[in-house]
Structures are given as C-alpha cells and as structure tokens.
Image: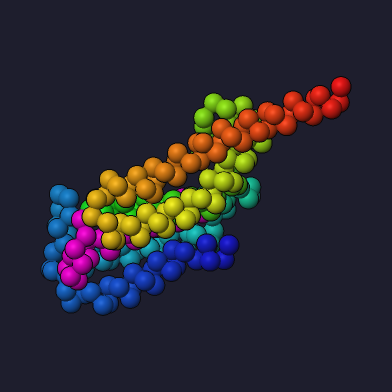
Amino acid sequence: MKLYRSLNMIFLIIFIAGTALCFKYLPGEIPLFMQSPSRGVFIGICSVIFLALAIAAFFPHKISQNDNEVRNDITLTVINLFGLGIFLFYFVTIAKYCGLQMNYMKGIVLIVGGLMVLVGNFLPQMPYRSRIGFKLPWILKDKLCWQKTHRFAGYTAIPFGLIQCLLALFVPNDDLVFLLGLGIWIIIVCIYSLIAYYQNKGNCKNYIKNIK
C-alpha cells in the first residue's frame, strides 16, 4: 500500500529524469490539439499537476472527507489513474522529439493498459452492487458471485494490462492489441462470472437437499 500511495511520487521522479534527458531535443513550442504552448509552460503545468497528485495521494481521506477505508482506496485509485493518464500523455507527446515514433492511438492503448493494472488493485475490494464494477444481471443477483467475479477480475486485470502495454510497443496493429488485452479480459471475466453464478446456485440447491 505504501508503494501504491507513492505511485504519483514515482511518476514525478521519472517525469523529472525524463524531462532532463529529453529537454535539449524539445522544440520551443509543443504543438497539441488546438494550442501550442511554449516548452516551459508545458513542462511547468505538468510538473505542478504531478506534484499536486503526489501530495494528494497521501491524504485521500481529506479529499473524500470520509474515514471509510474502501472509499478512501477508491479515491486513491482515481488519483493514481489520473496521474497515470497525465504521465503517459506527457511522454507520448515528447517521445517523437527523442527519436521514438509513437502515435496518439498507441498512447491510448498504453494508457488503457496502465489503467487496467491500477483497476486490478481495487476491483476485489468493490462493495456489493457498487457503482463501479461488472454489472451483468446474474452478478447483481448473487453477492457471492459479485465477490468472486471482482476478485477474479482484479487478479487478471494486472497481467492482461501489462500484456497490452508490452504488445503496444511491438505490434503495429492497435486494434489487435486492444482485442488481445482489454477485449479478451472482459470476455474471460464475463464467462467466469457465469460459471461462478451457476456453481453457487448448484451449491445452494445441494445444501437445501441435505437439510431436507
């Protein structure tokens, strides 16, 4: 958990080191979507965001204004997800100036893969019928099925997220990477949830028969 709280601090350190190494290659203006801020402004805004997120990650209870552990974990996860998104966006933006050819679509694939890794850390803790999670009809009917599904989803999201990030670096077809990463993960979790539901249903029927 200490490492999880320090994730944005790690992003900040990598950001500083990466910027120092790539600074001389960056142009005076960084062309973005509709604006081209100066190099100093772009780096300055990103550094302020990283610093703010790194500090906020140590005080999630102040942001959520609640002492509930699960709620604070979710708040911390949202902070980390935001930090990861900014981190990947920044390095995808400056990568081309350092000799690394990387388009925005590939950056999105990497961001989604990174989000899967982070989401995998808190999915097993999701309360029954939470706003976040897999909400298939049979999952919502059975609390044990909900718990099993989200535990399984959390454990599998991390390796599938890492696989998606690695494939994005070596496979040119981004659609195929999405399918092999996010797509297969969702399908596997849905199939597992259905199996868990019928297993629980069968165990419940056997228990009733034994009582009779």
Q: Nearer the viewer, residue 2 or 50?
A: 2
- Which residue lies at the image location 48% right of the left edge and 55% below the top edge? 158
Q: Main secondary structure of the magenta part?
A: helix
Residue 114 visible somewhere in the drawing: no
Q: Nearer the viewer, residue 105 or 34?
A: 105
Tell me, yes or no, whether the highlighted magenta stretch contains residue 36: no
Q: Which part of the image, by quadrant, shows the C terminus?
A: top right
**Magenta region:** 76-103
Q: Position of residue 124 (x, y in %)?
A: 59, 47
- Which residue lies at the image location 59% right of the left edge and 46% below the top edge? 151
- Which residue lies at the image location 33% right of the left edge and 66% below the top edge? 47
Q: Position of residue 15 (x, y in %)?
A: 33, 69
Residue farthest toward the top in the current orientation of the protein: 212
- Which residue lies at the image location 33% right of the left edge and 73% below the top edge? 16
Quadrant for residue 45, please give it. bottom left
The answer to whether 84 appears left or right of 97 in the picture is: right
Position of residue 182 relative to residue 135, above or below, is: below
Tell me, yes or no, whether the highlighted magenta stretch contains residue 85: yes
